[in-house]
Image (spheres, grey):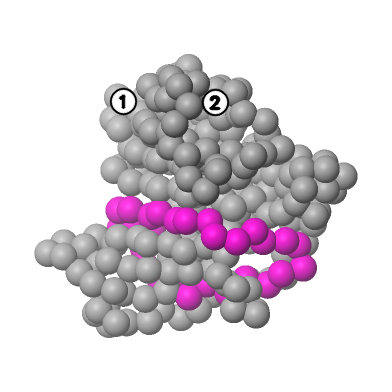
Amino acid sequence: MAAALEEKIGLKLTPATFKVESGKIKEFALAIGDLKEEYLSGEKVPPTFPTVIDFWSEGDSTSALLGVNMEKVLHGGQEYEYLAEIKAGDEITITGEVENVYSKASMNFFVIKKEYVNQNGETVLIAKSTIIERH
Amino acid sequence: MMQTGFEFKPLVKQEITHSQLVRYAGASGDFNPIHTVVPFAEKAGLGGVIAHGMMIMGFIGQAIGEWVSVKDLAKFSVRFSKMTRHGEEIVVTGKVVGETENRWICEAKAQNKEGEVKVKASFEVKK
């Protein structure tokens, strides 16, 4: 593996915070077409809502962190481990780092691990994303 | 009745539209133009815009929420295998494949009407 790639292991995301609002939960549920009352009222969040926290917390973009071209980036996989409930009103802070980097079939794979902690210091979620850079 | 081998009721989604991709971009905050801007996606060699993989994971999440209570969902992971485009209709199927003392181990997949598998998922539900 190229040394430049290996150097990305351990790169840390700048921590970013997002306040969960019921209107945002509803907007996200509507975009998916998942019209459960508990989402529309903001009482609960859909299982993939953490992606909203990723993007709207306006932390480092993955392409900027990894130094890759957005045109060449694909999402290979996503994993969530749910430890506690996320609900409207919560302030969630994300920390994360590049856990692994490898090359396969002339593509580069980056595994990013993130932890989501609420305003009470409770870890509510652990996520792992696999990002693929095409050549 | 949950038991190993149990098959959940498939979730049939409406045809994906380009507008839905734009709407999902705004809702999720993922504004990568490969999902919304046709000339950009063509230049990127994708032959047109592709759906956000996370939206298809969202469809599977929708199905899971219809099959079990989301508060019991402990783990949910996916691998994105094929690109999805507007005009496609996605069906989500799932089944229980095993159990531990306190978890149901389940699998799901999202495929189009032609049977092309777009996303494969595994998930664990608290008993």
Residue at image position (48%, 69%) is B109
- Asked if residue B71 is among those painted magenta in the image, a careful observer would answer yes
SS of the residue under disc 1: loop
Asked whether, in this view, residue B125 is left or right of residue B116, the answer is: left
The location of residue A96, given as percent across then percent down, is 41, 26
Q: Which quarter of the figure has residue A83?
A: top left
Between disc 2 and disc 1, the foreground one is: 2
| Residue B43: mark in rendering | none
The location of residue A47, given as percent across then percent down, is 45, 52
- Where's the C terminus of chain B, which quadrant? bottom left
Classify A111 as above or below B125.
above
| Mark 2, residue position | A66
Residue at image position (30%, 42%) is A84
SS of the residue under disc 2: helix
- Which subunit holds the residue at mark 2? A
The location of residue B65, given as percent across then percent down, is 44, 64
Question: Marks 2 and 1, Cα distance to the nearest angstrom?
Answer: 31 Å
- Of B63 and B77, nearer the camera is B77
| Mark 1, residue position | A120
Q: Residue flagged by tag 1: what amino acid is it?
A: Asn
Q: Residues within 10 Å of mark 2 (few under 14, many from 20)?
A: some
Asked whether, in this view, residue A121 is left or right of residue B89, the answer is: left
- Of A119 and B3, nearer the camera is B3
- Asked if residue A133 is among those painted magenta in the image, a careful observer would answer no
Residue A113 visible? The answer is yes
- Which subunit holds the residue at mark 1? A
- Of B44 and B80, nearer the camera is B44
Residue A50 visible? The answer is no
- Where's the N terminus of chain B, which quadrant? bottom left
Give the magenta part as a residue range: B66-93
The location of residue B112, given as percent across then percent down, is 63, 73
Q: Residue flagged by tag 2: what amino acid is it?
A: Leu
